[in-house]
Amino acid sequence: MMKSLLEYIKEAEEKKIAIGHFNVSDSEGFKAVVESAKELGVPVIIGVSENERSFLGVAEIRALVQVEKEKGQPVFLNADHTYSVEASKEAINNNFDSVIIDGAEKPFFENEMMTIEVVKYAKEKNPNILVEGELGFIGSGSTLRDEIPDGVSPATQTHPEDAQKFVEETMVDLFAPSVGNVHGLIRTGEPKLNIPLIKKIHKAVGVPLVLHGASGNTDEEVRKAIEAGISVVHINTELRLAYKKGIEKGIMSSDEIAPYKFMAEGVEEMKKIVRAKLKVFNRI
């Protein structure tokens, strides 16, 4: 019997490795992530944000993941960055393995109340569905940026005391802090991850930590973050760039008009990123 997502995450936490979480918008992205994980023999999380779910379809992505599970592949589905209770409930009703209720831009109390409601609903529907909460703003959107987003600074990083209070009162299964990470890629260079802060938060909260916005951070920084207590690492922007690069290459290199042929270039470029990241996360 396949282990649950929480069991895989707890195992990663103990081994000081991390589960890779990769966002997809279509079946090509899904193919790239799953095939890469299969090749390396590691579990993987498929992430779909609200917009990605809208484009691909909630039932459709759930079906793709279920097919892989029935083959015995440890592939899990996460409702990434969900900004309302209602959208969270939709993912829970469709048996996603986990959901992120993202109230990081809201005042602490409002964020907390939203998260509590989602946790309660999830556990009543299916105790195995994990709920992740966020505290501390890291920007939004997996895009290329000229500079760090407004509102993201050392002052907005998560305080361990606040993190502890938030986790204890919401009873989330996973926690995503702001520790120098930023959504998207910064053309002038990514800010440094606050490794000492990760250690303090990990000690304070007592649940596995998730690192969002890891695109652009160096392998060495990510390894240190995992050593400090990160158990799940999110990648999106680097994957999007690789996909676009591959499709452009496929279209420009010939007069081929069969989509499955020129799209294959996009899949291969994404696989290069996924394989490289999974090797770092899993110390392969």
Image (cartoon, rainbow, N blue to C red):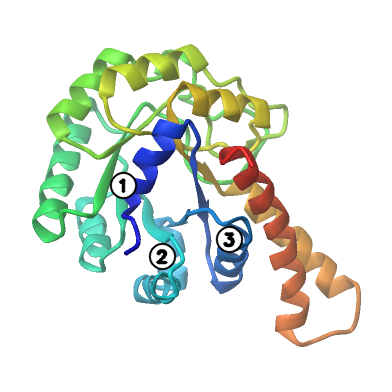
Residue under label 1? 6
**As shown in the figure, which amino acid type bears the numbered disc 1?**
Leu
Sequence order check, earlier mark of 2 and 1 = 1
Asked whether 54 or 3 is in front, the reply is 3
Q: Residue at x 68, y 59 (%)?
A: 271
Q: Please give the count of numbered marks on the rendered protein.
A: 3
10 Å neighbourhood of mark 2: few (<14), some, or many (≥20)?
Answer: many
Q: Residue at x 42, y 55 (%)?
A: 49
Dividing the image into 4 quarters, which one contains the C terminus? Answer: top right
Instruction: Indicate the secondary structure of the residue bearing disc 2.
Output: helix
Residue under label 2? 53
Up the image or down, 241 lies above or below 254; here it is above
Sequence order check, earlier mark of 3 and 2 = 3
Q: Residue furthest right?
A: 254
10 Å neighbourhood of mark 1: few (<14), some, or many (≥20)?
Answer: some
CA–CA distance in space, label 1 to label 3:
20 Å
Q: Residue at x 58, y 63 (%)?
A: 38
Instruction: Indicate the secondary structure of the residue bearing disc 1.
Output: helix
Give residue 1's quadrant in the image: bottom left
Residue under label 3? 33
Q: Badges 1 and 3: C-beta atoms under 8 Å apart?
A: no
117 with respect to 261 (left or right): left
